Amino acid sequence: MPQDSVSPIRYHIPMRIAFFGGSFDPPHLGHLAIAHAARQALALDRILFAPVGLQPLKPRGSCAGFEDRAAMVQLAIASEPHFALSLLDAPKPGQTTPNYTFETLQQLRQSHPNDTQLFLLLGADSLRTFHHWHCAAEIPFLAQLIVASRPNESLAELQSLMPPSISIEPGPARPHNFRLTNPAGAQSQLTLLPNLHYEISATALRQSLQNNSATEQIPPEVLEYIHQHRLYQ
């Protein structure tokens, strides 16, 4: 057989994708820093920034509409080839029920090959409410958790933030890696991004925008969009 007729061997490399949901009202530099740290720590192929239509724990909704928040996210990540806007949590016509992360991750799982590794990226404040989330005990076994931690996060404190049915113990890559186990014996992983808790309050940012104060924590392209569309006035 002639050499040029031999097909090259093609290797399939599973994708590593992180889902990063939130209000992004507005997106700020803390969000970008957490995503960069997560990608570097876990060699992620893609991070999906997903503005949420209606958060279960924020019944009054967001200040800016979904389309504006999605547009701001797109501007914030435009120069980042490994970041992408996801519309999985976009509001649906006539929607009255919240967007649940568990259901969104199920959709993400179904839309990718079985060997795709899924991760859920959380800020430190989101972890504080995690045990209240819908189907929280099942979420880590759909997607491994990546958490931007507060300084000196202890094992006992992390255990207190998990649903009661999940046990947590140090993993092989100490001190920032932990093994999660459920009663059925299924295991997952929680990875801390150490000392990445950014004290950036979206409420404070919106108040600064109302007062025309300095807002260095917002990407310039996003800030220009906010001014052009007179958001948070």
Image (cartoon, rainbow, N blue to C red):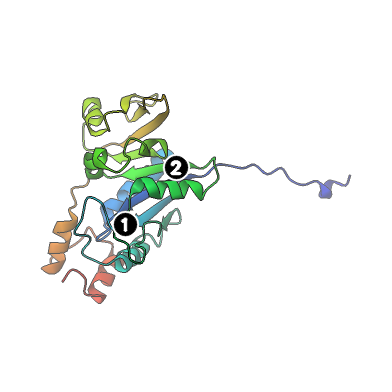
Residue drawn 16% across and 66% down? 209
Indicate whether 229 appears above or below 72. Answer: below
Residue drawn 21% across and 31% down? 152
Quarter of image, res 122: top left
Indicate whether 89 appears above or below 125. Answer: below
Toward the viewer: 119 or 83? 119
User: What is the number of the mark on residue 118?
Assistant: 2
Q: Nearer the viewer, mark 1 or mark 2?
A: 1
Residue 15 visible: yes
Q: Residues within 10 Å of mark 2 (few under 14, many from 20)?
A: many
Residue drawn 22% across and 28% down? 154
Toward the viewer: 157 or 93? 93
In terms of sequence position, does the residue under pointer 1 or pointer 2 come before the other? Answer: 1
Residue for badge 1: 52
Mark 1 in CB contact with mark 2 (< 8 angstroms): no
User: What is the number of the mark on residue 144?
Assistant: none
